Image: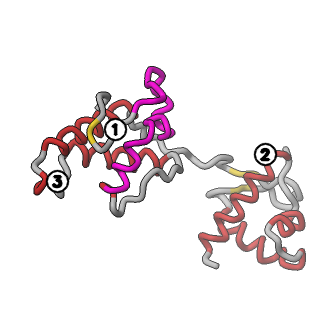
Amino acid sequence: MKVTKHRQRILDVLREWFRTHKEGPTLEELCLLLEMQTKQKATVQRWLQTLRGIDVQWEDHSARSLHLLRPEPQKPSVQISATETLRYLATGVVQWEELPVEERSQVPEALRIGLSRMYLTSMLQGEETLEQSDHLCNFFQWAEQPSCSWAASQDIHYLSPEVTLVEDGIASDFA
């Protein structure tokens, strides 16, 4: 296990600890939380030392003074408008449909931008809406489902739950 894996594991365990406790854990308690034997305190202490001043801090010779410097992980500050993303997707579907059949392997710019925005929004929210491989095939299957099935679109209060981008294989009235 690399140092970064130890770091993340310790930070996750400590965040969970501090959700229910005001004081930090002892080394013995931390060993148990990390599913290690208490005789491995020295190892845990070495790992903590590499995090000291960066992620954790404590008072020397004080058993429960361990605390996190940043209690919760920082959330991404990127905000992508779901309304604009749906506009790009709808415009792209209509443009794609207007292409001659032999040119439909080329993705219109609006659809490409809409897909990229949707993937990025989904990744930032931890949602797995579509796989990027075979994106057109998967997208058109997804686009026949109500748009409110995409978590980001639930922030659009005026969007009807029945709205889809594609109906019966062609662009919907909504698109």
Given the current orientation, which residue lies at the most extreme front position? 168
Compare marks 2 and 1 and give the one earlier in the sequence: 2
Callout in the foreground (3, 1)? 1
**Residue 100 placement (x, y as % from top left):** 10, 49
Residue topped by disc 3: 104
SS assignment at label 1: strand
Callout in the foreground (2, 3)? 3
Q: Which mark is residue 167?
A: 1
**Residue 63 placement (x, y as % from top left):** 89, 59
Q: Which residues are drawn in magenta?
A: 137-163
Q: What residue type is labelled 1?
A: Glu
Q: What is the C-alpha distance between the residues marked 2 and 3?
A: 52 Å
Q: How crowded is mark 3: few (under 14 residues within 10 Å), some or many (20 or more)?
A: few
**Residue 143 placement (x, y as % from top left):** 37, 43
Q: What is the C-alpha distance between the residues marked 3 and 1?
A: 18 Å
The answer to whether 106 is drawn above or below residue 50 in the figure is above
Compare marks 2 and 3 and give the one earlier in the sequence: 2
Q: What residue type is labelled 2?
A: Arg
The residue lying at 11 percent from left, 57 percent from top is 102
Q: Which amino acid does label 3 sit on?
A: Arg
Q: Residue 19 carries which label?
A: 2
Q: Which of 36 and 162 is in front in this view?
A: 162
Callout in the foreground (2, 1)? 1
SS assignment at label 3: loop
**Residue 112 placement (x, y as % from top left):** 25, 49
Quadrant of the snapshot with the C terminus: top left
Mark 2 near mark 1, Cβ–Cβ under 8 Å? no
Residue 30 quadrant: bottom right
The answer to whether 63 is drawn above or below residue 157 in the figure is below
* Residue 153 placement, left or right of 1: left
